[in-house]
Image: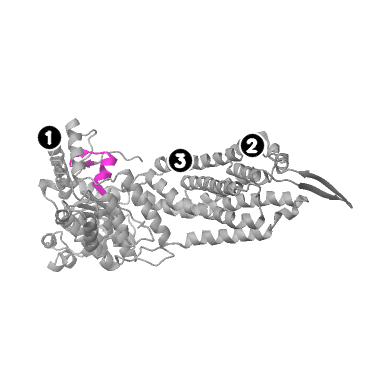
C-alpha cells in the first residue's frame, strides 16, 4: 500500500531538503573511495562539510541555549578548524591506528569491515548533525566491533546529537545502551514503543497472559502450544524493571545487575513473543497497555505544546507527533524552521570549492592507482606498434588496389579500437556511480561539479593516451599522409581520434547511467557501438543505406570519425591505382588522386565539419549524462 504522512521536527513539518541539511545518514553498505587513506577521506569530507572556522559574529549558536560541544569550542573562532575536526573524529571513532591506511577494495588490501563502518560514521560526524540515522550499523560486524561502535554512538548522543538506528536482534549490552526503542512486527506495525527500561514490565504484565492463553488453546497444534508456553516462561522477576532502570541508558546496567542478569535480553524475549502472536494482536495489546497510553499521552502533549507555542529554533533533535496535515504556525513556523536549519544545518560548500576538491581527489586517485592509466598506455602502444608494423610503408602499394584498401582498413581499425575501448570503461564508471550517489545524497556536492571534474581529470587523460600513441608511433611507421609539410594532417589525425574517443565515451557513459546493471550496460553499449560501426561507411556504402535507417548516420559517431579520417588521409595523395585480375588478365585503372578515391566511396570533403560535429556530439552526450544524473538518478534513503 501507499504510506502517507508528514516528517516533523520539533513539532513542525519539514521538507526533504531541510531534513538533509539537519541530519546525517549512514547507509548499510560502506561506499568509500578505495585509494584514499582514512585521513584523506575525512579531510576531503571536512573540506566540503565543515563550516567556516571563523564564523561571523551574528551566526546563531549551534546548540540549544547557546551551548556548544567541547569539539565546537575547540574549532570555532580560529583557523585550522577542519584539521582539528578530522583529528578529533579520528580519536572519537578509534581510527588512530589506521589513519594512514588506504580504504582498499577487493583488489587492494586495506581496512577491515569494522574499520570501514567506523569511517562511514566518522564522515557524518564531521558536520555535527542534529540527527544521525544509521541503517543496521552492526550488520556484518563481529560482536566486539559491534559493541565498540555502539559505545561510540552512545558518546555521540551524550554530546547532543540524536542518534537513531535500525538493528536486528541486538545483544544485551548493546540493547542496554539504548534509551528509546521501537519494535516492529513483520508487517511493519508497532509492537512496542517506549523507554528501553520499560520493555521488561510490558512483557511481564501485558504479553505474558496472552502467551499463556495461547499455550492452552486446543485448536493449535502441540508444537505451537509448546512454543507459546516456552516463550511465556521467560524470566519473570518483580524487580526486573527497577534493576533495569537503575542501569539507565549509559550502558552500565550489566555492571549493576540490570537486565542482562535478572531477566535475560528483553529484546530477544519480545522477538520470541512476536513469532507466536499475530501482528494485529501485538498492535492491539500495545495500544491497550500502560506503555501505549503513556506514549500517546506524550505525543499529544508535545503536539499541543508545539501547536500553541513554537519552541526556540536552536533546538536539537526532534519528536514527531502524528501527522496533522499542513505545518502549524504559517509563515512564523517556516521562519522558525529556517532559523533552525541556519543554526544546526550542515555546511554547504560553494560550487568552486566543490569542483576544486573533487578535481584534486580525481588526480590523487589516478596517481595513487596508476595501473589503469599504465594499462591504457601499454595496450595503446602495443596496438600502435602492431598496426604500424603490419602496414609499414604503405606508399609502396600505391600502384595497386592494396594501397587504397589498406588505408580504408587502417582508418576503420582505429575507429573500431576506440569504440571497443570506450566499452571497457562501463563497469568502472558504474562503480564510481555508487560513490557519487552516496556522497550527493549526503549533500556535500551537487551533480555538475562532480561530472565536470570527472570529465577533465578522470575521463580525458585516459581518452588522450591511445590517440597520442597512434599519432606518434603508427602514423610515421605506416607513412600516412605527409603531403602537408607543416604537419597539419597529422595534427588533424590526432584531433579526430581524440574527438571520436570522447564521443564514444560519452555514449557509453550515458548508457551506463541509464541502465540498472553492468550486464545490461554492456549489452546496450555493445549494440550502440556496433550500430555506429555498421553505419560508418566501411561495411556499407553510405549511398546504399536504406532510407528507414538514414537517421542512424546522423547519430553514429563512427560515421563522422571514419569519414574525417579517410578524407584527412586521402587529401593530397596522387598516383593511386586500382588493379584486378580476371582470369589470366590483369585490369589496371589510374592514376587517381586521393580525393577521387574518397568521393568514389561516398565520402564528402568536410574534415573540419566532421571534427566539429564530433566535438559537439561529445559535449552533447556529456551534457545528457549531467542531466540524467541530476534528474534520473535518485538516492533512496
Residue on which disc 3 sits: 623
Disc on the earlier residue, 3 or 2: 2
Q: Label 1 belongs to which residue?
A: 308
Is 97 on the left or on the right of 196, as rendered? right
Residue 232 percent coordinates (x, y): 23, 60
Compute the Cα span from label 1 to label 2.
Answer: 68 Å
The quarter of the picture where the N terminus appears is top left
> Residue, x 19% and y 61% (percent of image)?
176
Q: Please identify, in this view, whether the residue under mark 3 or under mark 2 is nearer the observer.
A: 3
Left or right: 402 as drawn, with respect to 502: right
For marks 1 and 2 on the same chain, the one whose residue lies earlier in the sequence: 1
Of callouts 1 and 3, which one flags the residue occurring earlier in the amino acid sequence? 1
- Tell me the tag on residue 549: 2
How far is mark 1 from mark 3, CA to CA?
Answer: 50 Å
Q: Which residues are magenta?
A: 8-23
Q: Position of residue 449 (x, y in %)?
A: 37, 45
> Is residue 20 found inside the magenta-colored segment of the image?
yes
Q: Residue furthest right?
A: 584
Q: Secondary structure at mark 3?
A: helix
Relative side of 162 to 590, left or right = left
Q: Count neighbours of disc 2 (C-alpha within 10 A) and say few if under 14, some if 14 to 19, many if 20 or more.
A: few
* Front one among 400 and 269: 400
Residue at the outermost front position: 485
Q: Position of residue 157 (x, y in %)?
A: 18, 55
Expressed as whole percent of the image width and height from the top left, the position of residue 253 reads 15, 64
Amino acid at each position: 500500500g501507499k504510506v502517507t504522512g508528514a516528517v516533523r521536527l520539533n513539532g513542525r513539518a519539514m521538507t526533504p531538503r531541510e531534513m538533509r541539511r539537519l541530519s546525517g545518514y549512514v547507509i548499510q553498505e560502506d561506499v568509500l573511495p578505495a585509494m584514499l587513506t582514512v585521513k584523506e577521506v575525512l579531510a576531503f569530507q571536512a573540506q566540503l562539510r565543515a563550516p567556516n572556522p571563523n564564523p561571523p559574529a551574528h551566526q546563531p549558536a549551534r546548540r540549544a541555549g547557546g551551548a556548544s560541544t567541547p569539539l565546537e569550542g575547540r574549532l570555532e573562532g580560529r583557523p585550522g578548524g577542519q584539521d582539528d575536526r578530522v583529528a578529533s573524529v579520528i580519536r572519537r571513532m578509534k581510527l588512530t591506528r589506521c589513519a594512514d591506511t588506504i580504504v582498499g577494495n577487493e583488489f587492494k588490501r586495506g581496512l577491515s569491515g569494522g574499520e570501514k563502518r567506523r569511517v562511514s560514521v566518522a564522515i557524518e560526524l564531521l558536520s555535527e548533525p542534529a540527527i544521525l540515522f544509521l541503517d543496521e550499523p552492526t550488520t556484518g560486524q563481529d560482536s566486539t566491533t559491534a559493541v565498540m561502535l555502539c559505545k561510540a554512538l552512545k558518546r555521540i548522543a551524550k554530546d547532543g546529537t540524536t542518534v537513531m538506528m535500525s538493528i536486528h536482534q541486538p545483544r544485551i549490552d548493546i540493547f542496554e545502551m539504548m534509551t528509546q526503542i521501537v519494535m516492529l512486527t513483520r508487517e511493519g506495525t508497532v509492537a512496542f514503543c517506549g523507554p528501553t527500561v520499560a520493555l521488561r514490565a510490558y512483557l511481564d504484565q501485558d504479553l505474558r497472559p496472552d502467551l499463556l492463553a495461547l499455550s492452552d488453546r486446543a485448536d493449535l497444534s502441540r508444537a505451537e502450544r509448546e512454543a507459546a508456553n516456552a516463550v511465556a516462561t521467560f524470566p519473570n522477576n518483580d524487580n526486573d524493571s527497577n534493576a533495569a532502570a537503575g542501569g539507565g541508558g549509559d550502558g552500565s546496567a550489566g555492571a549493576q545487575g540490570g537486565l542482562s542478569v535478572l531477566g535475560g535480553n528483553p529484546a530477544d524475549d519480545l522477538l520470541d513473543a512476536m513469532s507466536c502472536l499475530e501482528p494485529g494482536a501485538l498492535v492491539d495489546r500495545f495500544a491497550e497497555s500502560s506503555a501505549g497510553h503513556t506514549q500517546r499521552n506524550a505525543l499529544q502533549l508535545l503536539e499541543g505544546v508545539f501547536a500553541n507555542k513554537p519552541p526556540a529554533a536552536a533546538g536539537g533533535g526532534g519528536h514527531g507527533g502524528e501527522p496533522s496535515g499542513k505545518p502549524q504556525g504559517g509563515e512564523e513556523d517556516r521562519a522558525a524552521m529556517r532559523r533552525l536549519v541556519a543554526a544546526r544545518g550542515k555546511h554547504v560548500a560553494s560550487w568552486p570549492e566543490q569542483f576544486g576538491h573533487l578535481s584534486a581527489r580525481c588526480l590523487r586517485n589516478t596517481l595513487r592507482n596508476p595501473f589503469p592509466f599504465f594499462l591504457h598506455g601499454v595496450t595503446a602502444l602495443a596496438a600502435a606498434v602492431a598496426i604500424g608494423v603490419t602496414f609499414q610503408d604503405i606508399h609502396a602499394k600505391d600502384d595497386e588496389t592494396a594501397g587504397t584498401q589498406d588505408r580504408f582498413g587502417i582508418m576503420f581499425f582505429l575507429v573500431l579500437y576506440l569504440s571497443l575501448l570506450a566499452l571497457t570503461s562501463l563497469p568502472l564508471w558504474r562503480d564510481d556511480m555508487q560513490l557519487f550517489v552516496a556522497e550527493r545524497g549526503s549533500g556535500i556536492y551537487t551533480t555538475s561539479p562532480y561530472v565536470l571534474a570527472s570529465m577533465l581529470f578522470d575521463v580525458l587523460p585516459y581518452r588522450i593516451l591511445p590517440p597520442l600513441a597512434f599519432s606518434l608511433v603508427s602514423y610515421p611507421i605506416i607513412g600516412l599522409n605527409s603531403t602537408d609539410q607543416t604537419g597539419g594532417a597529422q595534427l588533424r589525425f590526432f584531433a579526430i581520434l581524440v574527438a571520436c574517443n570522447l564521443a564514444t565515451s560519452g555514449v557509453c557513459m550515458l548508457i551506463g547511467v541509464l541502465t540498472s546493471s553492468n550486464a545490461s550496460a554492456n549489452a546496450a553499449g555493445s549494440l550502440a557501438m556496433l550500430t555506429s560501426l555498421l553505419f560508418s561507411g566501411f561495411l556499407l556504402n553510405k549511398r546504399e543505406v536504406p532510407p528507414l535507417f538514414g537517421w542512424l548516420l546522423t547519430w553514429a559517431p563512427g560515421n563522422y570519425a571514419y569519414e574525417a579520417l579517410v578524407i584527412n588521409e586521402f587529401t593530397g595523395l596522387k598516383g593511386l591505382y586500382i588493379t584486378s585480375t580476371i582470369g589470366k588478365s590483369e585490369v589496371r585503372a589510374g592514376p587517381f588522386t586521393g580525393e577521387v578515391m574518397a568521393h568514389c566511396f561516398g565520402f564528402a570533403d568536410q574534415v573540419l565539419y566532421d571534427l566539429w560535429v564530433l566535438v559537439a556530439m561529445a559535449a552533447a552526450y556529456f551534457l545528457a549524462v549531467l542531466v540524467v544524473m541530476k534528474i534520473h538518478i535518485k538516492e533512496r534513503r
